[in-house]
Every structure is written in structure tokens, then in C-alpha cells.
Image: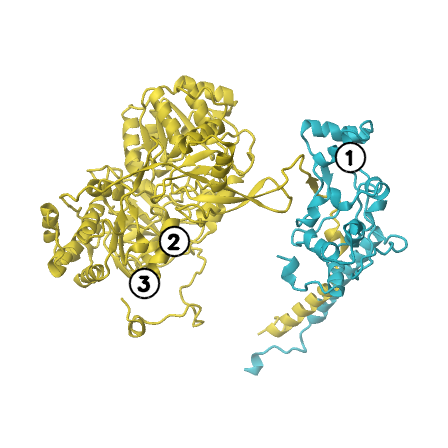
Amino acid sequence: MSKTKIDRRNFLKVLGLGTAGAAMAGCDMPSYVTSEEGAEKIYSYLAPEEYMIPGIGVWYASTCQQCPASCGVHGRVREGRVLKLEGNPDTTVNAGKICQMGQASIQAHFHPERLQNPTINGKDATWDEALALVKEKTGNAAWVTGTVSGHQRVLMDAHRQASGNGRHYAIEAVNARAWEDASATLLGDSNPNLHIDKARAVLTIGADFLGTWGNPVKSMRDYGNFRNAPRGVLMAIEPAMSMTGANADTWVAARPGSEAAVVLGIGHVLITKHGVSAAGMPSAAAAFAAMTPARVLELSGVSTAQLTKIADTLMSNSPSLILANASHAAAKAAQVLNLMLGNVGQTLTPSTALAANGLAPLTGSSKDLVEFAMDANAGKIGAAFITGTNPSFLAPKGLDMAAALSKIGFKVAIADFADETTKSCDVVLPMSSPLEAWGTHVPVNGGASGDIHIQQPLMENVYANTRGFGDILLSVGQGAGVEGLGAFEDYYGYLRTAVSALIGSDMEGDWNKALQAGKVTAATIPMAFKAGEDVALGFSEPAAAGTLSLVTSARQGLYDGRHANLPWMQEAPDQISKAVWDSWAEMHPATAAKLGVKDGDYVSINTANGAISTRVFTYKGMHPDAVNVPMGRGHTDYGTYATNGVNPLTIMDASPGDRQTTELLSSNLAVQVSPTGENRHLVRLMDVDSQHGRKLVATITADQFDRNQGGA
Amino acid sequence: MSADRPQHKSFPWIRTLIGTAVVGALIVLGAQMFEKQLHPLAPGEAPAPRVPGADFPMDTFAGKDVPQPINYSHKLHAGDLGINCLYCHTYARRSKVAGIPPTAKCMGCHTVVGTDKPEIEKLTAMWSKGESPAWNKVNDTPDFVHFSHERHLQKFLLNNKDMDIKDSPDVCAMCHGDMNTVGVAKKMKPLTMGFCVTCHEKNNGPADCTRCHK
């Protein structure tokens, strides 16, 4: 070793002396650090309300619009700016809690890349010009939205009726459509109330209720109660581990696309081993009888022992609840099992319908995405309003969304950010952020309360030339000559009149009370389940064992990609891989070994629809035949922060996976995976899974747990 | 083993590095001296504010004149006319910040008083346009310092049995100097960490870092 090389001891000496010298000199902060005299401006209020005190926040109620769940929020407003959101404790849906996506709405609200001016063919225009053009060209227009409810939906419906009954497509890539359809078929109620807290065992098959499915905030609270004594047992069957799967006591990996077969297999064991009756449902019983454990093993890789354990747990922990959203077939079979096990009426109860017409949520699905593309390509859509969804990003290449959009004569985007879809629209109307606008929302998973959440502006527009979504809808409706709208100057006026009618009072005090609570409780009509009837249960054959299939999980944070432009959400580590700012392909270590790749190796994932290339992240919570690339990244036109990663949705199969319902599937797509030879480190929060012997998290073996606790 | 270890005595850079550290320290000290040259202490000691039960540093600071959109006079309002500090800076006892009074408060008097003076005409013009004057901040602590006016007023004024609310100028003067003597506003106390800590030590104020730096 050379004599001039600094060793540790000398390095520390020098560091210490240098620090001491600087510290001695800096003991009293030099006055130039603080003497910012005249460097900052300070503005006073003009004539503030008595309760407005600079430095002290005032909380106002509003409604979160970051996902379709529509949780109630309280926003802290200080010096005219909204700084922080918390859950509104008065709501039955989220009861005082919100998720990270809700917290990030503040960042979306103050985002520098928000749309600021109306444009016509990409050139700035005035609102009058843009609205005049919209009025002239949108006869018979279709509406393309995400999940919508409340008075915004009423205005859209009124506009469609007044302008020639264009179709309303509600598009959500992350949806509960399989569950909704199965519930409607078997119970006559597409969104029955779920009582996770009342169940003693919950089995989920592709319904990630702690992550993105339904209202995760509500589910998490129910889940907390479910885990309180007596502790409920959570089981999950899925090809790639989700947030819910990661919390499950029993997690079973099933081959992608084989979920329905596994549910049928559980039914088979329940009938043959436990004598559960499928009386009155001969076709269902036949399907159960045909799905022997041996057949389940062959189709899904789920062993007889696993199948039996799940069936035993369901039997010994009654009432249970089986949730499924993996496919229509799986959801239908799960609902039949709920009927057979007597869960219906206990952990599944009928929802209530609002007495007022037209406010109920129109829930989105990817079925509507497919149908929108097909209708547009067939030239059936002359004009369209597109808002709250991004079909160009969500659509697989095979749907040819670019061609479909170009065949629509006139497209209006009502958006707060420029994205892949607004780029191809003729007119773009910049809307205020949800924290600046009025609205009403009916939560999809609202419980039995009849609550209508009120969205009220928490501050003035950050960008002066934007308008509230409701105000734009009102102008568009007035332009189309919708009856009864002419009298209203703005959406606030319309909403106030409409809400007054709902609560049967137009007193100032009652309106203020509604705003303070953030909700009104409207009259409801109780519903009843219909009697269980016999349905045919089927399943689709998954790809053969050993064939890799692509799964595209949705994760809380980026969701379906709508939050990819928020650095907070890019920076928040993924719940499973802990990765940030980039895409990855999760695969089982055995699969990676077979392909000859390791962590960080780039692989090309090829389908008939194209290829994406991203790096491998090996993870044991995977079926060896599954490759999971979570959705949300890989935007091409969604601002500075959304460009990284790849979009797995583009290479998904465009032909509807479930022919009966034309719903796209998020799994069951055979792919070829080949290494590209490149390797780059995937940046993860934790980076290593080892605790290096530091016992950061105490663990015991399953054997010890069983001995001590008498585990499930 | 030991043969591989470097010989500490034959380490030639250490003197250079110590020298660099000393020079660095001298530069910082020099900059401070220079800064003090720029802002010499005010001649003579400011009159000692009378706050029973409080013992606080007498340091002064000669702040520069900061031009303001309206040439308001603290001397006239607070000094000659004897208006209580808390009449205008009403937020000081309720909030972290003392706040600039809302224009409505100014107009409470100035719709009748002194309406012909040019500065009042400026104010009235802004008021009728619905604009606030853009004041230049004179006393400013860095963003990593959390100072609460409310807490300090509670200790030295509101919960101090020897003080009456009319004595507020004496309490405010602890950190702001005698505002009754200046025009718009001038920084008259250093408001450095040393200034804060000296007072906290003398008056048993909290000493944990996180009380102010959060």
C-alpha cells in the first residue's frame, strides 16, 4: 500500500478538524443568512372572514376524485391554499381515511403541467370559440368517460337525450365487471354490500380488495375488523401475488387463466368431502362434479392438498366470503359457492338504490373500451366527448385505437392534463382540478347509507382560465338546448338547486350543513336478492403447462396509469417489488433460471401484438408460468414524469378474452420471453431481501407458530 | 499484518489539510467581520424594554431601509397615536404569524381619516380595485425555523401577571426593537439562532432542537 494513500484514521482526523473549524466559525449564524430584508413579498387579506387566520388551517369537506371510489375528504386550507387532505370521518365509505393516491391529489392540483387554456386543433383559443365549435359539431355525440355518478352523470345523460342519444362508454381498465356481472346474474344486484368484517374466512380469486379492487380504503377498515379476534382467515388464489395475496394466511399460485377451474375444484371438494348441497342447481352441480382435483392439478397446478385445505377452512369458518374478479367464469362459480355455503344474506347483503333517478354510478369496464374501438372503427361514432379516461393508453394495439379515433369526425377532450388521447382531439377544454370544482358523487361501494358525497372547491383556480368539470358540462348542455338548464349561470347554482330538491329543503342552513358534512343522505329504495337459480358454469382452458402467460397487475399508486405523471406516485415504492420510477417483469426464480436470466436482465416479452422490453425481478410469489408486468407506466404523451417504463397493455390480446361479455382479461395471454443481453440494476427501496441478521422484523417458523398459537 | 498498515508519521498531507481547514475557518470568520462592517450595531444601546420576569439579549441590528408600496408609519400610528400593536397585528396572539392587518382594517379608519393624503389615496385605489399591497418582508426567519408569535405572547404578555395588554409594545420590542420610532419597518434585532438561544437559556425556554427546527 502506498504511503500517500489516506487511511481511515487520518481521514477521520482531517474530517474532524475541518468540521471543528467550520463549526467554530459558524457558531453564531452570520447575519447574511437571515437578513433577507425585503427579499420576500407578503400580502394581506382584503376583508377576511372572522375565522380566517393566517397560519391556521381551516378544514373543508370535499370528495376525492383520484379513483372511482369517491371517498369523502377534508382539505386543510391555509392562506387560500389547500395543503393537505385527510379522510372525512363522517362518511360511511372511508370513515376518516384516504389512501396514498388521495394524498397525491394535492400534487396533481398544483402540477405545473396542467392544461391551462382551451385549444382548437392544438392552437390556443378562447372559451367562447371552443364552446361555439363544440355546440356546432357535437350532435349525436357519444360520451367516453370513466366511472361517473351524481349530477355530472345526470347532465351527460340529459345532453345525450337532447342531442340524439349517442352512446355512453364508461371505460375503466381496473374494474370489478366480472364480479358485478356474476352478482347481477345470480343475485339480481350488481354491487351487493360486502361484509368482509363479518366473515370468518375470506377467499379471494383475483379480487385485490386491499389494493385496487372496489374501495380499498373501506375494505382495509373492514379487513382490520376481520383480523380482530376471533381472527378471520384470509386465503388468496392468483397467478401473481397482489397486496391482498401478500396479506393472506394461505396463498396459492394458480396458472394464469385457470382461476375458474380452481373455484370449480373447491366446489367439487365441498360437495364430495363436506356434503355441501348444490340442490336446485343441477347444471352447476354437474360442472363441480366434472372438476376433479386431478383435473384441477392438471389445469392450474394447484394440488389436491391445497384444494382440500381451502375447502376445509371455508367449512370450519362460517360465514365465509368468496370474492372473485379473475374472470367471468370464476366470479360466477364463486357466487354459486357463496350461495351454497350460505354466505348470501350474511356476508353479502342487498345494496340499496337511490330513490332519485339518474344519480347512481355508471361503473366502467374494459368491455366498453373494446366496444368503443369497434364502434369507432366501424364509423358508427360521429362525434365524441372524452373525459376521465385515456383510451389511447389503455387500448391494446390490436384494437387500433389511433385509427378508431381518427374515424370519429369531431372529438372533444375535457381534461386537466394533456395525454395520449387529448393529443388526437380536435378541441381540448381544460378543466379545473377536482379540488377547485363542484360536483356530487355516489360511491360505488357505498354501503347501505344512501350517501351522496359533495365535492366542493377547496381553493380558487390555480390556473385562471380553467373551468370546473360541472361548469363545462352545463355549458355543453345549454349549447345543446337541454331543457331546464338555461336558468343556471353556473354549475354551483344548478347543483345547489338539485341538492336542495334531494334533501327537501332550500334553506341556507341546510345547504351549509350539507357542505360541512361533505355529503347528503338521500332517500333510498331497499333491494332484495332474487332466489338463487341454476346457471351453467364453465371455465376456459389456460395455456399449456410450461407456457409463459402475461399478467398485468394493477397496483395502488399508479393505478391504471392515470397517476404516472405524479412524482409522488412514481417515487412511492411498488407494494410487491418495492421498485420505483420504472417497470419490471416479475417472474418466479425457477422460470428465470430456465430462461437463463437474473435480476436486472432485460427480457423481451413478445406477443402477436408486439413486444415490450423490461428487466427481470425474480419473486417467489408467482406461478412459474406467469410473467407479471404491472400496468401504469410507459406513457408517450403524459408529461415529464410519466415517460419511463413500458406499457404492457399495448401487447395484450385485443380479441375479447371472455367472448360472452367482451371483457378484456388481464391475464391468460401466452407470450414468448427472451433475454436481450442487457442488464441494469432495478432501483428498489429495500434492494435486498435479507435483513443481514439484524432481526429488523422478528419471524418464527410455521411450525413454531402452530405449536404456540394453534394456527389455522 | 502490521507491515501493510501505512505509517501515520509519514503522512505528508495532514498539515496541508489542517492548513486548509484553518484557512476555511478564517474565511468564514472574515466574512462575518465584513458583514458586521456592513451592518454596524446601532449607536448606543436601545432603551431596555420593560417586561417583568423576562431577561433577554440586548443585541441590536441596524437593518436597511426597505422600500414599501405604501409609506406607512409605525411611528405615527403606534408611537404618536398610541394604537396598540395587537389592534392591527391581531393574529399574533392566535397564530404562528403576526400577519399584516387586512386592508379592511385600514379602511375602517381611512374611509374618513386622512383621505386626502397621497399614501391613503394609493391605499384607497388598491382597495377599490380589490388588490392587497405587496409588502416587502422585513423580519424573516429561514423556512427551517418555526417561530410562533402566539406562544411568545402567551408567555410574556397574556399569561404574565405583571403585564397588561396595553404593555404589548414592550413585549414586541424584545424581538422587533422599538417600533414606535421607525417609519414603515426596519429590522432592529439580529434574529439569529444565537439571539434566540440566549433568550431561551435565560428564560428557561425549551432547548430541544425540534421545538424550532421541524
Q: Chain of mark 2?
A: A
Q: Residue at x 28, y 27 (%)?
A: A375
Quarter occupied by residue A579: bottom left
Quadrant where the image shows the N terminus of chain A: bottom right
Q: Calculate the distance from the C-alpha at mark 1 to the C-alpha at mark 3.
A: 69 Å
Chain identifier matching the cyan colour in the rendered picture = B
Q: Calculate the distance from the C-alpha at mark 3 to the C-alpha at mark 2.
A: 14 Å
Q: Is residue A534 left or right of residue A38?
A: left
Closest to the observer: A23 or A702?
A702
Q: Which dot, 1 or 3, sits closer to the camera?
A: 3
Q: Residues within 10 Å of mark 2 (few under 14, many from 20)?
A: some
Q: Badge 2 is on which residue?
A: A221
Quadrant where the image shows the C terminus of chain A: bottom left
Chain identifier matching the yellow colour in the rendered picture = A
Residue A694 point in image, percent of width and height: 45, 71
- Asked if labels 3 and 2 share a chain, the reply is yes
Quarter occupied by residue A142: top left
Quarter occupied by residue A38: top right
Q: Badge 1 is on which residue?
A: B70
Q: Which dot, 1 or 2, sits closer to the camera?
A: 2
Q: Chain of mark 1?
A: B
Q: Residues within 10 Å of mark 3 (few under 14, many from 20)?
A: some
Residue A701, visible in the rendered structure: yes
Q: Is residue B24 above or below residue A187?
A: below
Q: Residue at x 46, y 18 (%)?
A: A132
